[in-house]
Amino acid sequence: MTSQFSDLQSIVTNGLCTGCGLCESVIGNDQVEMKLTSASRMRPHEIQPLDDNDMEKIRAICPGIALTGPDKSQVEDAGVMHDVWGPIRTMHRGWSTDEDIRFRSAAGGAMTALGCYLLETGRVDAIVHVRASVDRPMETDAIVSTTPEEVCSGSQSRYGPAAPLVNVNRLLDQGLRMAVLAKPCDVAAIRRLEAVDSRVEQQIPYLITIFCGGVPSVTMVEDIIKYHGVSPEEVSTFRFRGNGWPGFTHVETHDGREFDLTYERAWLSDDVPWKYDNQFRCKICPDAIGELADISCPDSWVMVDGKPIYDEAPGANLFIARTKRGQELVAAAAEDGAIHLDPFTIDELNLQQADHLARRTDNPARLQAMAMEGVPEPDFQNFRSDEMTHLAGTERHEATIRGTRKRIQGADHREPSE
């Protein structure tokens, strides 16, 4: 099915690019460059025309056009392959034992703590992740950290375009061992690379991710700062979350003005002049929960009367170990005092992450709608689509098909290539 994408721009214009940057990394930045388009999304641009061999490499690794879910064999000796939540070997609620990391990070500092621990114990040489751009604070840069201090500099969530994988092939060529701390689609890209590059298994032993709500454009950020009466040139700091949990969406200007929005106001309100304008590929994502990672680290929300609340509190994450490597890492980090762990159950997960449950069960209907409309569609395999359809129920499944078809008819999936 991936053969329908004969050139790089066909992936972009049909709304299937995730913006991970792996194509630039593998093909080379003398031929492919990741940059923002006119729609304020991070996309690959051809500097030199790509030949058939280049496109074959891209089709083999692109997570936008094909993904294969996890194999149940990875939990045969421990844990469960859950219909909705995928492979779970162990699951805990917890946080970084470093109070500064816990406070600064978007939740409990789980990913930052694990990244620091991996470097401190010599398990890896580098951490691949992102952080706020120093020169363009509303944007996000890919970085490679080799010290815990550098890891901590990227400890807060970035709700916007980034290309975290642009450095991966260079690090492989240098013989470095690395961990990737990134979104589920970025992790999926590494799994696809692993299938065609034998170096990945040994040199990228750890993939750690979040539960993802999708990737909006930079336009959303621009609309938020306009709401405060601030121009882009005036912004010195833009923080999506962090410095508390869930943390305020925070804007600072060069002349010292500061503006804050609560988590609920910034991301959950309908009466605001900005929109969480997810890219189309996020709307049809089969794995926003990081089933292909070694460890998934979503927020572990405070629950009241069976529903999450977003009052400021000490941060907490879940540590969902999906592989043997992930399970061993979580246990070792806890044993050595880098993280604190408490018991946690699937019943609690169902309540805390109910929005992700809906996204999972709706996914087969969205793909079916694409097929009905005859638009180029991705090849997603092994994500238990029959089980998801059954859990959604006939009425919801058919309603999702109708809604997705309507959006496609309105060209919601189309993107400019420049």
Image: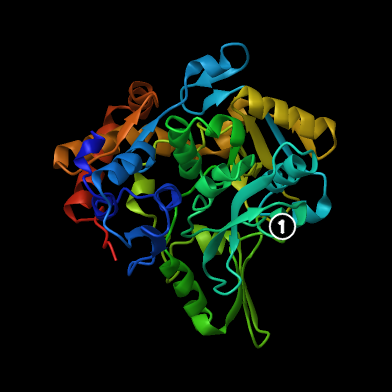
Q: Residues within 10 Å of mark 1 (few under 14, many from 20)?
A: some
> Front-most of 145 and 103?
145
- In the image, what residue occupies the spot 32% across and 70% down? 38
Tell me residue 327's x, y (percent): 68, 26
Q: Which residue is mark 1?
A: 150
Q: Is residue 339 left or right of residue 290?
A: right
**On the rendered structure, is 297 left or right of 232?**
right
Residue 306 can be seen, yes or no: yes
User: Between 63 and 303, which is closer to the camera in this rendering?
Assistant: 63
Which quadrant is home to the N terminus? top left
Give the residue furthest to the front: 174
Query: How many labels were placed on the picture?
Result: 1
Q: Tell whether 344 sits left or right of 37.
A: right
Q: Residue drawn at (50%, 84%), measured in percent from left and top? A: 231
Query: Given the image, on which type of amino acid does mark 1 rest?
Result: Glu
Give coordinates of residue 171: x percent, y percent: 58, 47
The picture quadrant where one finds residue 367 is top left
**In x, y percent, where is residue 187?**
51, 40
In this picture, residue 359 sits left or right of residue 265: left
Q: Nearer the viewer, residue 162 or 52?
A: 52
